Each structure stands twice: as C-alpha cells, then as structure tokens.
Image (cartoon, rainbow, N blue to C red):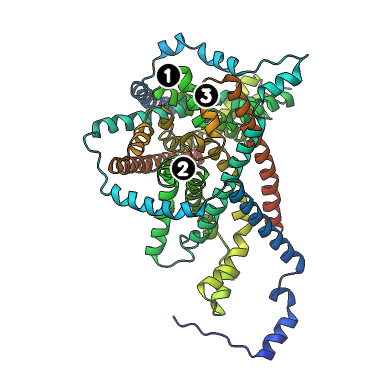
Amino acid sequence: MSRARIHLSGAERARLAAAHPHLVSPPAGTRVRTGAVIAVLAGLAAFGFWQLGFNFSRLGSGIAQLAHFVTLMMPPDPGTQLPLYMHALGETLAIAFLGTLGGAVIAFPFGFLAAKNVIPNIFAHFAVRRVLDTVRGVDRLIWALIYVTVVGLGPFAGILAIATASFAELGKLFSEAVEALDRKPVEGVVSTGGSPLEAVRFGMLPQVLPVLASQLLYYFESNARQSTIVGIVGAGGLGLHLAEQIRVLEWQKVSFLILMMLIMVAVIDFISSRLRFAIIGKSRMG
Amino acid sequence: MSHAITRLPDEQIAPLIAHYDAAVRARRRHTLIVFGVIAVCIVLAAWMGEVKPSVFFAHADRLPNYFWSITPVLHWDTLGADLSEWYWNLDHWLKLLVDTIMIAYLGTLIGAIGGFCLCFLASANLVKSPFIRLAARRFLEFCRTVPELVFALLFVVAFGLGPLPGVLALAIHTMGALGKLFAEVVENIDMKPVEGATASGASWLTTVRFAVVPQVLSNFASYGLLRFEINVREASIMGFVGAGGIGQDLVEAIRKFYYSDVSAILLLIIAAVMIIDLVTEKVRHRLLGFGAQR
C-alpha cells in the first residue's frame, strides 16, 4: 500500500487556515482548560512525590535487584512441596466458592430491602444502603485480619472475610438489578390478588435470577483472585505460602506459586464465562 | 362484572395439562440437578476450607464482642475529652491517610499513563499485526491477574520498605486493568475519522493523536477516576506488607488489640473512601454527560 502525501503550498495552507480557524487551533477556552487540568494533575503528582519522600536513586538499584530476582525465578520449581501447594490451591478455591456463596445468600434479602421499588420507605432503604457502603469501605484484607483475630488462623477466616466483602458489593449490585426490572409482571401478580411477598416471588424473582446468577459468577472470578492473597495475613490458601517463600527468598518456589495462581484464574475465568453465557442466553430465550 | 370464560371439553384439555405438567417436571428436575451440584461443591469446599460449624457457633459470640470492644466509650458530658482520647493520634493518622491517598493517586496516574500507551497497541482496529496485539494483550493480562499485594511483597524485598513499592505495585496492576478497559473503548470508536486521517496521509501516531484520542478521552478519564476509587481502598492495605500508608498502623492496632485505635483508623479510612467515591462519581457523571453532548 502506498500513501500519497498531500503537499500544500504556503499560500494554500494560509488560505485554508484562515477559512477554518477553529480546526487549526482549538478555542482559547479549551486550551486554557486542558492546560489547567494537566497542571493540576502534575502538581498533585509533584506534591505526592514530596509527601511520600520519594528517593529516585532507590528506584534504579531496586529495578536492578528485581531483574536479578527474575533470573533467579527461572525455572519455576516447587521443590518437594508440591502436595502442600496443591492442598493450598484447594483451600483457595474453597475460600472463593464458599465466600462468594455465603456473601450472596446474605446479600440476597438485602438486595430487595435496599431497592426503592420494593421498600418505598426512603429511610429504610437509605439506612440499608449506608450499611452496605460502610461494609464496602473496608477492604477484604482488613476483614480477613479481623476474622483471624476472632476465629483464629486458617481458611475459615478467609471464607468469612470474602463473604463479608462480597455481601456488601453484591447487595448493592442486587438492589440495582431489582430496581431496573420491569414493573408489569409485578402489577399482574398484584392485580390478581397476590400479596406483596408473592409479587416479589412470582413477579420479580424470575426476572432478576439470571442477572444475579451472572453477577455471582463474575464475583466468583474476582474472589478467586482475592482469595489468593488473604493468606498473607494468615487466612489460608496460596497467599500464606507465597508470602513465606518471598520472605525466605526461595524465588523458584515463588514463581511456581505465581504460575499456579495464573493458571487457576485462567481456568476459572474460562469455565465461568461459559456458564455466564449459558445463563444469559437461556434468560433471553425464555 | 362477570366474564364468560369458555372452557374446553375435558378430552381437549387433558393433553394440554399433561404437556404442561411434563414441562414443569423437566424444569424441576433441571433445578434439582443444579442444586445437587452446588450442594456437592459446598460439602467439598467446606471440607477443604476447614469449616467447623460447631466450633463457629460455640465461639459465635466473639464476633459481636469484638465489634463491641472496638466501639469507643463516649459519654455525653465529657464528649470532647472522650473524642480527643479516641483520636489521640489524629495528626499522625491524618498524615498517613494523605500518604495513602497519594499512593493511590500516583499509582493510578502512572498506571493510567502506561495503560494509555499500551491500549492502542492492543486494539484490533488500529494494529493489524496480530503478534504486537497479542503480546500487548498478554502483557496487560499478566499485570492485572497477579494481585497488587503480591507485586507489593516482591517490590518491598527489591526496593525496601516504604511507599515506593506500594506505588509501583498499584501502578502495574492499574496499567493491566485500565489497559484492557481502554482497549475496549478504542475498539468501539467511530472509524470514519481514522479513515479520514489515513486517507490524507497521516502517520500512525498522528492518526491516533487526532482521530482516536479526541473520541476516547472522556471515557478514559471516567475509567481512570473509577480506578482511583478502587486504588484508595487497595492503598489502605499496602501497609500490611510494609508498602506504606495507613495500613501499617491498622495492622499493628489489630494485632496488638488496641481496640479503640482499630475503630478510629477504620472510620477514617471509611470516611475517606466515601468522600472520594462521592466526589469522583460527580466528576464522572459530568465527564460522561459532557462527552455525550459533543
């Protein structure tokens, strides 16, 4: 493919520029605004570097050291610990699965309570929303740390942490799904003499279930990633071993564990995207 | 008001009813199978995850007790003094909170710049070479699949304790996550300006600058702000592995059972996260509304 370039003479160019000034240079207002936005972003960055006391010489030596670690990581090798790591992988999967499911079971009623079209009382749904927001503001690793002090070390603390965080996030998503649904089936149930509970069961539930199931699978994917790190604070799974091996600088085991995580996440993504397509496709046909 | 409902003769209704019952039975069977599979998974996972309901219920009082203990003692008469005792270390915590937000900001900014540079290479409509595209995609995927905290753990060993490894870890993860979202935006652009620029002989970079960037910038900014919200949360736990921010003090307070400190720091984090969520949501709505108007 050959490209022909258009060559304009100086006079031609000047004439075109004079005819369409707004195309050649944007209006002054836009320019000032763009400049201001960039200046604010850069100024904040400079403030950040100053506030955090950045030492750029450490950056260079650190990168050199990191490159050295990467050469030490090759090839990935579990040593004699493979059975232990497989067990940890099972724990991680268990944490992700039970955490997501537990969170969803608790979030399910809250999704309806926080929806404007189910509970018209503005205070009730405001209160439920704020509770969900508060729980959501705390990261799952903080929950894991709290649960470790409450129920002790081990994967159970991880399950509780993932469940708590998923509960708040899913509760919000569920309530949005409920608010977005079609009113007509609900009116149909009410007009034939159904109670409010029956309106929810037969008018709303069939509409929201496929949406909820697909969100649930999506959260399972994301929780599978998160459950690999709750072990860093002692809540079971691969993270525990990973943090340990990084501390003792066993780089080949570290790279093996990271590889395990990547493969697990890829497999789960593949399965759950298949399932999600199946669920959404079915709901469209029905 | 009454309606006359015509009722079919029984011999005509019978097959219809049989058909209906069969359909309902098939659905029930399907649902039962799904529930059966889920139940088996639950049992397996509970066995793997060392779930012991008896132990849990025996100690079920610990969780509410814990939250009760971290609740500070406040009396109405001495509210001021109680509050200042609760937040005895406020100056230090506020500095750490600003640190945390700055870690999130720098991580988001650096990551967004990286994602911006890579997203055009990962877009099918701009890059014809499948090799470059796949390489860019796989790289972004790797960056977002490895959790931030794992990068942080590695970087703390390489760069030493402090906010630097936290910023870098967030930046790399953000680059992976934003690069993918940005590439999806770029793949959905209107191709006519690109064709126009190419037709008038523009180079690839000029095409991207004048035909692609103006179309996608408001969406990019919106995704970047959304990521900033997420990163503030993530930055608050970077201190767990020594990568700076308020997490260091929180982890100490929780491990050493400084109960009132736990609630004080948690409330600070929650308040900061909520305020940032509110502000960025406003800005994002304006950005997207602004983009739609043009």
Residue drawn at 27 percent across, 49 percent down: A74
- The disc at residue B254 is 3
Label 1: few (<14), some (14–19) or many (≥20) C-alpha neighbours in 10 Å: some
Rendering coords of residue A194 (x, y %): 64, 20
| Label tally | 3
The amino acid on which the numbered mark 3 sits, given as a three-letter code, is Ile
- The disc at residue A225 is none
> Which residue corresponds to mark 2?
B148
The amino acid on which the numbered mark 1 sits, given as a three-letter code, is Gly
Residue drawn at 72 percent across, 66 percent down: A31
Rendering coords of residue A132 (x, y %): 61, 28
Q: Are marks 3 and 1 on the same chain?
A: no
Residue B259 falls in image quadrant: top right
Residue extending farthest top = B58
| Secondary element at tag 2 | helix
- Tag in front: 3 or 1: 3
